[in-house]
Amino acid sequence: MPTLNIASIEAALKKAAAEHAAVTPPTITQMVDTFFKTLDTNANGAVSLSEVTAFLPKNAPLATLVAGLVFNGFDANHDGSISKAELTAWATARDTNHDGTLQATEIKGDLVQLVGAVFPHGLPGLPGSHA
Ligand SMILES: [Ca+2]
Ligand SMILES: [Ca+2]
């Protein structure tokens, strides 16, 4: 039977912390960075409706409608393009437990649920994606 002492407890805690760190979801900043880069195919720092449309699978059900809804959801100032700030604000507003990361549960019931119909494996860059 292994002895239980302070050192062994500390070692166990350290191991658990390391394992936790390995599965820590990306921060909102990292997530937005990844997602924005994926969407902004011409890399001009803004995401257009056509970039969102092009991102959706061609045979997706109601792809045009979904693209429009997603686009309007992100384009907070309705200037016809999605900025990284708008995407960050959208993601930050959904971080309900304010831990700086987005869990799938926090965005359930929101736009992503709609998008989930098109992306059954989750959005690229989102924790919980299996893509
Ligand atoms: Ca762009
Ligand atoms: Ca905008």
Image (cartoon, rainbow, N blue to C red):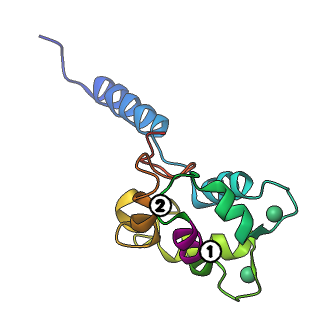
- Image point (41%, 58%), residue name: 116
Whether residue 88 sits left or right of residue 114 in the image: it is right
Task: Determine crowd level at label 1: few under 14, some 14-19, many 20+ residues with C-alpha closer than 10 A.
Answer: many
Residue at image mark 2: 102
> Which residue is located at x 47 percent, y 63 percent?
99
Question: Are the residues at dot 1 and dot 2 in contact (C-beta closer than 8 Å)?
Answer: no
Q: Which mark is residue 48?
A: none
Type of amino acid under label 2:
Leu
Apparent side of residue 47 relative to residue 4 in the rendered image (left or right): right
Q: Does 65 lie within the magenta span?
A: yes
Q: Give residue 71's mark.
A: 1
Asked whether residue 80 is drawn in magenta, I would say no
Decide if residue 84 is on the left or right side of residue 116.
right
Q: Position of residue 5 (x, y in %)?
A: 24, 25
Range of the magenta residues?
64-70
Task: Establish if 56 lies above or below 15.
Answer: below
Label 2, residues with CA under 10 Å away: few <14, some 14-19, many ≥20: many
Give the residue at x 52% y 52%. 59
Q: Of helix, strand and loop, which one carries label 2? A: loop
Question: Of label 1 and label 2, which has the lower sequence position?
Answer: 1
Q: CA distance from mark 1 to mark 2?
A: 20 Å
Image quadrant of ligand 1 equals bottom right
- Residue type indicated by callout 1: Phe
